[in-house]
Amino acid sequence: MINYTTTYRNMADLKGICTLQKANLKKNLSDQEIETYGFVTVDHSLEMLENLNAIEPQIVAKDDKEVVGYVLAMTKQSKSDIPIILPMFEEFEKIDYKGQLVSEYNYMVVGQVCVHKNYRGKGVFEKCLQLYKDTFANRYDFCITEIALTNHRSRNAHKKVGFKEIHIYTDLYQTPWVIVLWDWNDSNVNTQE
């Protein structure tokens, strides 16, 4: 049975996130695996995860003691800690959402989502994000993230939960990204409740 929880002060779960992440990094997958399963881009060190976890807990799905899915929680406070995603935060300074710049809201960033390939299609992604919403919606206006434009599996999964694609940009490395936002106060989105 899969248990959904937060990583509050749990080093074993953070190590489990690192293990699952490494297995799904784009650089560690074949082209066929990338197309079929999707991928994660940022390689977070255990120290990076500890720093994120000191601000807000991370969301994990565990089968017994093994982490089989996770959603990383990141706030504005961490924007300089992971240089590769700094361009995303810079884009938030340009994007208008409901008459206000995204950067002016109190938002959470979905730092990364990953589900073990043997657990995909079983609702783990949706249940992790529902716990993310349940954990943070009372303190933040919405959650937002970027997805590689070519990561069709991830884009479709995020849309299914209720994320809306609000902006596309190309970073300094010529990688196109789509910024997606899940407005927890918008009654017109599918929240899987």
Image: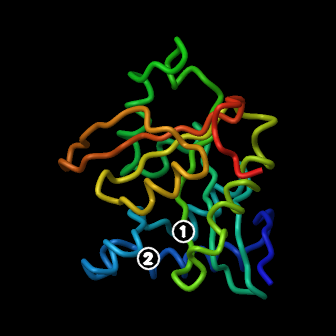
* Circle on res. 144: none
SS category of the residue bearing label 1:
strand
Residue 116 position within the rendered picture, expressed as x and y whole percent measured from the top left: 55, 79
Which of 145/2 is in front? Answer: 2
Which of 96/77 is in front? Answer: 96
Three-letter code for the amino acid on which mark 2 is drawn? Asn
The answer to which of marks 1 and 2 sits earlier in the sequence is 2
- Is 42 placed above or below 11 here? above
Q: Residues within 10 Å of mark 2 (few under 14, many from 20)?
A: many
- Residue in the image at 28% along x and 80% along y: 32
- Residue in the image at 32% along x and 46% along y: 177
Q: Which residue is mark 2?
A: 24
Residue at the extreme top: 99
SS category of the residue bearing label 2:
helix
Three-letter code for the amino acid on which mark 1 is drawn? Cys
Q: Which residue is mark 1?
A: 114
Residue 119 position within the rendered picture, expressed as x and y whole percent measured from the top left: 60, 80
- Residue in the image at 28% along x and 37% along y: 169
